Image: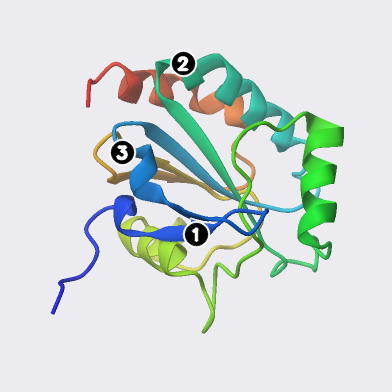
Amino acid sequence: MAGPAQTVYDFSASLIDGRTLSLADFRGRVLLIVNTASKCGFTPQYAGLEDLFRAYKDRGLEVLGFPCNQFGAQEPGSAGEIGAFCENNYGVSFPIFAKIDVNGEYAHPLYRFLKGEKSGIFGTEAIKWNFTKFLVDREGKVVERYGPSTEPKSLTGAIEGLLANPA
């Protein structure tokens, strides 16, 4: 019997186009994993996430977006609608995954792992809102958790620090 997952590389998720992608495909890269929504006050962060991705992808950063409709029903669209929204409004070129739950009985296993590795404010595990961010090092270990109000550009120093360490 296999033991519990040790890194994000032990998980797979479905992309918005339905293909399954193993996070092991990102081995050796720094990951910024974000639960997203199209109709949220924080939705303009898509632009900042895309800026980070474009600035650092050649140095080893991947941004992974996980749409979620658990907060104020702010991601009601279909996969096609979500994909078109991200591309048309924010020019998103980083991977967007199929809509998932991040909390509760049906929470995606990746998010169960992320929350267990880094709790939120006051030690709570539950994701509080859209655009909660998890920063993962090149070894697949969760380094930090940031709340929704943390602007993507404010993560530049932390990302550069992780990118400076070779895999």
Please tell me in which quadrant of the rendered image residue 90 appears.
top right
Measured Cα–Cα span from mark 3 to mark 1:
15 Å
Earlier-in-chain disc, 3 versus 2: 3
Q: Quadrant of the C terminus?
A: top left
- What's the amino acid at mark 3? Arg
Earlier-in-chain disc, 3 versus 1: 1
Total marks placed: 3
For the residue pair 24 and 128, the one nearer the viewer reads as 24
| Residue at the spot of label 3 | 27
- What's the amino acid at mark 1? Ala
Q: Residues within 10 Å of mark 1 (few under 14, many from 20)?
A: some
> Are discs 3 and 1 less than 8 Å apart at CB?
no
Q: Residue at x 74, y 53 (%)?
A: 37
Q: Viewed as shown, does residue 154 lie left or right of 74? A: left
Residue 26 marker: none
For the residue pair 143 and 60, the one nearer the viewer reads as 60
Q: Viewed as shown, does residue 4 lie left or right of 51? A: left
> Are discs 2 and 1 less than 8 Å apart at CB?
no
Q: Is mark 1 on a helix, strand or loop?
A: strand
| Residue at the spot of label 2 | 58
Could you tell me residue 76's position as x and y percent? 83, 65
Q: Is mark 3 on a helix, strand or loop?
A: loop
Residue 13 marker: 1
Q: Which residue is drawn at 30% across and 58% down?
A: 10
* Above or below, 48 relative to 149: above
Earlier-in-chain disc, 2 versus 1: 1
Q: Which residue lies furthest to the front in this view?
A: 19
Q: Quadrant of the N terminus?
A: bottom left
Could you tell me residue 14's position as x and y percent? 55, 59
Q: Viewed as shown, does residue 7 lie left or right of 64? A: left
